[in-house]
Amino acid sequence: MKNYSVLILITFALVFFMTCNSDEVVQLDTTPYEINYAGFPNPDLPADNPLTKAGVQLGRMLFYEKALSKNGTQACADCHRQSDSFSDSLKFSIGVEKLPGKRQAMPIFNLAWHYNGMFWDGRSPSVRDQALKPIQDPLEMNESLQNVVQKLSKDKKYTNQFIRAFGDEVITPERIGLAIEQFEFTIISNNSKYDRWKRGEIQLTAEEERGRVLFFSEFNPGSSVKGAECFHCHGNHNFTNDEFMNNGLDTESGIADEGRMKVTGALADKGKFKVPSLRNIAQSFPYMHDGRFKTLEEVIDHYNTGVKPSNSVDILLQYNLQPGGLKLNATDKADLVAFLKTLTDETYLKNEAFKNPF
């Protein structure tokens, strides 16, 4: 009889707990999301979209949500995999209709320091705007924003999370973009071997150090250090100048993708594309907007002797265009590759905060 009474009490307690838990009050949570910007300047984040724990979590959920696609088979993360530096190892990503895209998927990290448009051609002015474009692209997720809103509105975990992030359960395309923007702003890469070297925590190998000096040196064939000129376009903390440039991939008649010109209409922008960051470059192959180069060695060979003249090729490549190019030998090129690999950030590639929350 005593055991039976205990069993009744336990059962009552469980029912009471489950009832209370199901009646949990969901409300706005404005707890700020804290980020360690170690070694980086504080970014100029948009004032109308402050980072909160609830907003970042919602954006993370949406980034991995396959319901954003027409047939429920693809999420943003399917073309932007963390192990590939949130890019795609395919030359062109394959969309829900089994059709290839037109450009290589760009990596996602340190977007808080990108102020000059998104995508290879800069057609989106902000991360929130960019986040919505692949959903609607027929070659990518091929879904309407209206349908996405309807699907998410039927899912209680999303209506609850929108309450936590925005104060009510109203789901709109604008809020979807804002949430994904919050999450992507938290994807920071600042703990590579190079970063740790800059902080005085470790030493580079002799090969890596020679590559570093080459990378940050002006072209000077008469010197013991020839100089690879890389730093002009990839020299700041994020290893990109955030500009649009023609890097001499094709001659004038060979430019198949007009790049930035499609956005601005200016002939001077023909063949120009966003200068990508070189952080985690060893993980984000293939390279260039069209994925034409499979290896870092091929990329270096291009800049050494393969740059082609055109009307809009950048003036910074003047030495590359000279006979013999940058005159880098096999040792120089191997040293550069060794240095570029020091930009790989294993902390970022394995960070649990960026992984699938489901």
Image: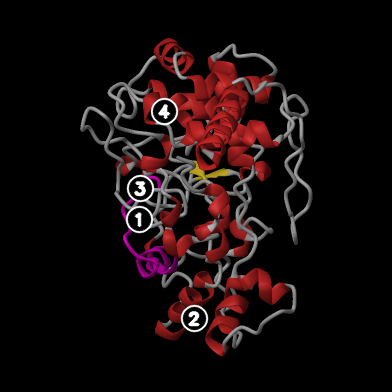
- Return the x and y of residue 293 as percentages of the image width and height: 33, 58
Which is more N-terminal, label 3 or label 1?
3
- Residue 294 within the magenta-colored segment of the rendering: yes
Which is more N-terminal, label 3 or label 4?
4
**Tag 4 residue:** 134
Range shown magenta: 289-305
Q: Is residue 13 left or right of residue 35?
A: left
Evaluate whether residue 169 shows in this view.
yes
Evaluate whether residue 345 shows in this view.
no
Estimate the spatial distance between the alpha carbons at disc 2 and disc 3, rounded to whole Å: 29 Å
**Tag 2 residue:** 335
Say what amino acid the circle numbered 1 marks: Pro
Which residue sits at x=38%, y=68%? 301
**Comparing labels 2 and 3, the label whose residue is closer to the camera:** 2
Tell me the element at label 2.
helix
- Return the x and y of residue 289 as percentages of the image width and height: 40, 45
Which is more N-terminal, label 1 or label 4?
4
**Tag 1 residue:** 286
